[in-house]
Amino acid sequence: MSWLTDPVGEFTDLTRAEQGVTLFVVAFAAFLFIGLLSGGLGPSYFLFLVGLASMYALLSLGLNSQWGFTGLINFSVAAFFGIGAYGTVLLSASSSPVREALLDAGVPGVLLNPVVGLVVAIVVAGLIAVAIGIPTLRLRADYLAIASLGLAEVIRLIVLNQQDWTNGSAGVRGIPSFFVGWPVLSDFPSAMPEVVVDLVPGGSVTLSPPLIDWGLTFGQDIVLGTPFWRALLNVSLVLVFLGASYGVLRRVHRSPWGRVLRTIRADEDLARALGKDTYSFKMQSFVLGSLVMALAGVFYAHLNLYVSPGDLDPITTFYVWVAVILGGSGSNRGALFGGFVVVAIREGTRFFSDLGSIIFDVGSTEVVISLGIEGGPMRLLLIGVIIVVLMRFRPEGLLPPQRELIWPGTVDEVPEGPDVGVRDARGGTDE
Amino acid sequence: MSEGATSMRERHEGADMEKEDVVLRVDDLQKRFGGLVATDHASFAVERGTITGLIGPNGAGKSTIFNLISGFYEPDGGRVEVNGIDVTGREPYEIADAGLIRTFQTPRKLEGMTVREAMLVGPRKQPGESFVKLFTDPEGVAAAESANLAEAQRILEEFEIDHLATQPATDISGGQMKLVELARAMLADPEILLLDEPVAGVNPTLRNDLAEQIRRLNEQGTTFCIIEHDMEFVMKLADPVVVLNQGNVLMEGPPDAVQTDERVIDAYLGGDA
């Protein structure tokens, strides 16, 4: 816990990229904290955002363990996400045709709970990953990309059209909380008392700094009711998923297993010549990533409580790719960070419709600066600009792998790894 | 086969197949790419403990033969045996398991790794390469990793490049990459090592280093089979030398005999005129 005793020393030990990201995270957390205190950001909505960000972080971790570790190009992130989401809701949601059929067939309803749904979703995602991997992973990398692109559409169209299983475009409603039927946790949100946080006793303080009227009012009572506790429970769930996935991926990334994957990414022929069964390693990497993506889907279903074929749109895949490339391919921390940033952009731009015009209060006259752009287009514009700027100035991503990856405990001093990311170096080779 | 080639073929005496302790035997190997016959019934054998040179003019099919032996290409016909095991048409990793490791003509770069990380890819059958064992037997993985790391350090020292251990693997010179590649191949503990142009593009000093290292490793028991264009290098190091021409073995013999053989000179000078 040297971060507690010597934060300055720890900070100076970091690489520049790590310092930058740390500062950014701290500043952003402070910004959100102010938002919470001022009442501009409701606590339940805040937790919803944290859940969403963690979900994207999970998806990014999954893709990173395919693309970042092994160099597998998977364009069916949304499909595995959808398999996870539909896998659990088809078993547990009250409006699910599959659940009804199973109940009619005499399967006891107790068995059809979200935990079993989770297991089923994971198993199905794994089987589909193996099925798509068998024909494509022996071929050149491009074939997996093409096949996965097709897979994503096939899964989406099946979900959309197989109405007697999935309700088609109507989607699935009546999704229970993930913890339904659990002792204590099942009733936790409604059993918790309503807590009122009164920051400034007896009133509120309005900040009116000069020039710009931010409209911040501090000290309004913050009410923490059932929705808050429910959201808190959801966030705890996704943080457990995220923590477990991150722990596993971090461990395997710096193992000899991960080293073979990184060798495959850099040069598959070299790995083959050194006696590695690259097909098997690629399959393991692909399935592992797909499972993590399905996990994100399971969580999403119980967060959003409504799942429809629209959730399988390719845009999700696109966002996750942006997150991984932004964070730095091959870096688990980068994937986490990228996932959070993408959600910050996705959700942050919702406020741009309000901020479409900023009103500056200069003396008696009001200066209106209009951006003339709505939230939706703004989001796409911003993401596009970020990708272009990133590729131009930092193609290896914000937080590429910073250090040597050797199984912990086997080396005393760990030197800093090359600051050059994989893509950058790859640009220099003749292939 | 055209008539010219046939008359040429009559002058091919082939390789010496009557060796005692053979590590690698290539028998009647064939490969075509469309209309091009790259390997045309090539046969030769590599005796244990030798440094066998494989030379031939450009387009003689040297690299193709290496790719066929190491499993990167599937042969159209013929047979490859490593240590008496038939490995024809097997996957490269299975052939590596039989004891044959190869290197590549252009040094392969491992981006994002340090030299010692890149070295650690070498050892075969590491327990840490099993996903399950990472969680069921972390101590075993750590022990094997420590042992491999010590071994990597030892080999780097033997190659006198241990000062590069924590350098990024992509930031070292081409010659050093060749040394690292050779050192890494040794970590895989091969019985026979196929080197594809080990000194192409390497400066004379490092070239001598490489020659010395190869000789030292050979004395310690590793068998080598080397493709090389640098005649001086091959003739100093290899015995015997197998000469390939037009996908077929022209002759085999000690370096002196090969250098003075008229057929070899003809082949290098461009044909059967």
Image: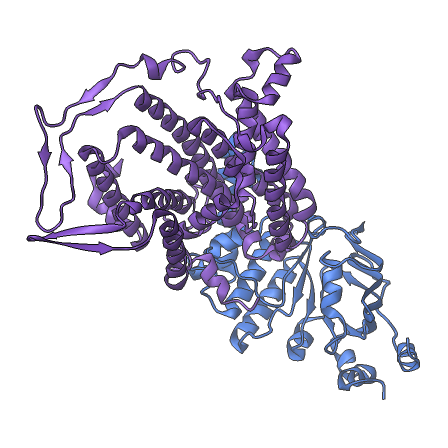
Chain colours: A purple, B blue
Say which of B263 and A387 sits in front. A387
Residue A29: x percent and y percent? 25, 40
Q: Is residue A225 above or below residue B121?
A: above
Query: Which quarter of the rendering shows the C terminus of chain B?
Result: bottom right
Q: Is residue A387 above or below residue A258?
A: below
- Residue at x-position 30% and y-position 28%: A44
- Relative placement, left or right, of A187 versus A293 is left
The residue at 37%/42% (across/down) is: A343
Residue beneath the point at 45% across and 43% down? A60
Q: Is residue A103 above or below residue B63?
A: above
A118 horizontally vs A98: left or right: left
Q: Which residue is located at x 52 percent, y 65 percent?
A: B177
Q: Image check: A117 left or right of A280?
A: left
Instruction: Name the quadrant containing residue A384.
Output: bottom left
Q: Is residue A375 visible?
A: yes
Out of A216 and B218, give the one closest to the viewer.
A216
The location of residue A272, given as percent across then percent down, is: 64, 53
Left or right for B176, reference A127: left
Tally of marks = 0
- For the question of whether residue A415 can be seen, the reply is no
Please tell me whether residue A166 is drawn above or below residue A131 in the rendered image: above
Residue B77: percent from the left, percent from the top? Answer: 86, 59
Q: Position of residue B28 (x, y in %)?
A: 86, 63
Q: Is B169 or A25 nearer to us in this picture?
A: A25
The foreground one among A161 and B201 is A161
Q: Residue furthest bottom?
A: B273
Q: Quarter holding the N terminus of chain B?
A: bottom right
